[in-house]
Image: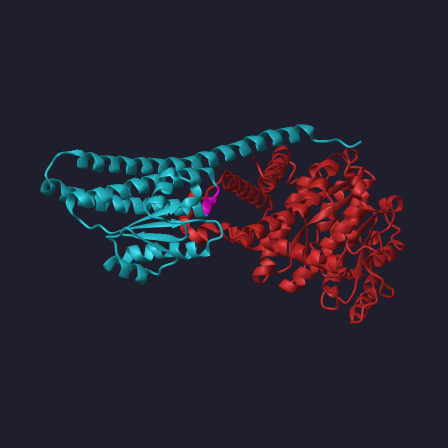
Amino acid sequence: MRSISWKTYLAAFVISAFLFGFGILAGTYLTQSVNDGLELQLESLKGRSGEVELLLSMNASQALLCPSLEAQLSEFDRQTTAFGAKLDLLENTRGRTDATVLRLKKEYMVQQARDFLLVQKINGYCGTSIPTILFFYTNQDCPECTRQGLVGPVLKQKRPDVMIYAFDVDLKAPIVDALQKVNAVNTYPSLVVNGQTLPGYRSADAIEQKLEG
Amino acid sequence: MLDLKTILEYGLAFVTLFATVFFLLVFLENKDRVRESPKPPKKLPSLTILIPAFNEEKTIAATLESALQAQWPGARKKIVVIDDGSTDATLKIARSYAKKGVLVLHQKNAGKGRALNNGLKHADTVMVATMDSDSYMEKDALLKLVGYFADSKVAAATPLMKVWQPKNTLEKFQRIEYLLTVFSRKLLSFINGINVTPGPLSMFRKSVFDHVGGYDERNILEDQEMAMRIQAYQYKIASSMDAVVYTAVPESLSDLIGQRVRWHRGGIRNILKHYYLVSPRYGDFGILVMPLAILSIFSLFLVFGLALYSLLTGAPNLLLSYGIEGVWFGLKPLHVLSAIILASSVVWCYVGIRQLQGETLSAPFLALYLILYAPLITLFWLVTAFKEIKGEKLRW
């Protein structure tokens, strides 16, 4: 029987196992650092909305408070939109069923609901009419939902003053269920434009008309 | 819970990494021997150079000139051309060399195996060299091969094959491929794992043919089949890194596909014929070389299948669809592993090329080779699979 290079096989196995393990750890670390980065940004968004809530709870005059609130809201909206885009990218690259994607999306939706309610409060307190759109969609066999999802960024470019909040109903967040009930949403996609519920797909122009109407 | 796709991907990554690391270790263990060049014996044995030829009127003359000029005592060197029923001027050109002592045999077209066996009947010498009729050996090639036969277990010795005057990009890619193959073969020789005695030039002990038998005349990859049979009989095959032979390579993609599909179809048949070699009885050849050869075929189709699955399920190309940020966001441990495997392959290529004296290679061209040429191997196998499924007749 011919010789077999057992020692070399063993050494190769140990080195390969080490490199393999290093690769897995490095990959996991890098993936986790992406997750951590997004978590931090989400925490920052929560902190900012907490500050806005704190401002609203102060008994300061409207003249004093409202300019500050509107400025905060504008910056806040910019950060939230940027975070939403990153979350979309994460969903596209890691897949819809990725555990981190699902968790971050759910937290983000809760944050969006909080923002929407804050905007309602600011509108009431400051007498402003900051336009809002709630967009309810599902990923289960809904090509119109996908079409509607593409309209949001286009509209936001035309109308940067509009606050758009998107809710994936498949994630079953209680606050999203409550918002649906309050606005009588039972088909998808559905939009709630300044409090008016519009079932089915709407183009950017049609939504603009509703905003102006 | 890991799905089957993930298990296959990571399993394949580990095996690839293991094979690369193993051969790098073999190199490190034997790096002083890589450039060895055993001296020829003081008294050279008798030698017959067999040159089977079929329709090689453009190259046979140059092949014969290189054989005639090869350093070896004239009285102990015999050159035999076996014309395999050529329909061009090959036979006429070969016969014009009869006056220089070349023996020219002619047979009805029956294939290279039959031609070589026909030639072997006239090889009453201690050593036999086989040579393709479109190859050209350097003058000292035979002297650099014969030294390996000081080891009585060595049945055959293989040369450093180089591409003859590569002109277009495809030929230049093949040049790199041939150089890296020689390095691989040298490493394989350290574990007695060589699985082919190349047609362009190989040297044998004549007695080995008496022991293992002549060439398989129904085989389209008879040079590989002979090597496997030599392994089966527990002989050694040596590899030289300085006995140079030049060979012509396909200039067009279609010709290259034709050549490689023949090699692959022949290779599959040889593996099936010699399946018993997958055994510890045959040392490292049996437990590593043969299994890797079989696994590499399956893994190629597996990788292709996984890529096709990703394409059909709409998985995006991260870089093209989302740019660098997309790659960063979509990073998985498998990507890091792939980068490690790629890096170790580049190291392996670099180490290999450095062992070949007088050969230079630019890093950008090597990168281009890895990116553009390596995927062609998938194409060769896809065409092979198609022809096998179609049951197309095998042709030399």
Label total for image: 0
Q: Position of residue A28 (x, y in %)?
A: 47, 35
Q: Position of residue B97 (x, y in %)?
A: 80, 65
Q: Nearer the viewer, residue A193 or A111?
A: A193
Question: Residue B371, relative to residue A16: is it above or below?
Answer: below
Chain identity for the colour cyan used in the image: A
Q: Nearer the viewer, residue B67 or B42?
A: B67
The structure residue drawn at horizontal position 17% and vertical position 49%, both measured from the top left corner, is A128
For the magenta stretch, what is the residue range?
A: A93-97
Question: Residue B367, relative to residue B282: is it above or below?
Answer: below
Q: Quadrant of residue A5?
A: top right
Q: Position of residue B262 (x, y in %)?
A: 73, 57
The structure residue drawn at horizontal position 68% and vertical position 48%, both measured from the top left corner, is B297
- Report whether B173 appears left or right of A113: right
Question: Residue A69, relative to residue B323: is it above or below?
Answer: above
Asked if one can make out residue B71 in the rendered structure from this viewpoint, the answer is: no
Q: Nearer the viewer, residue A23 or A107?
A: A107
- Report whether B200 appears left or right of A81: right
- Reply yes or no: does residue A178 show up in magenta: no
Query: Which SS type dominates the magenta stretch?
Result: loop
The structure residue drawn at horizontal position 86% and vertical position 45%, both measured from the top left corner, is B212
- Report whether B161 appears left or right of B44: left
Q: Position of residue A169 (x, y in %)?
A: 41, 45
Asked if one can make out residue B188 in the rendered structure from this viewpoint, the answer is: yes
In the rendered structure, the colour chosen for chain B is red
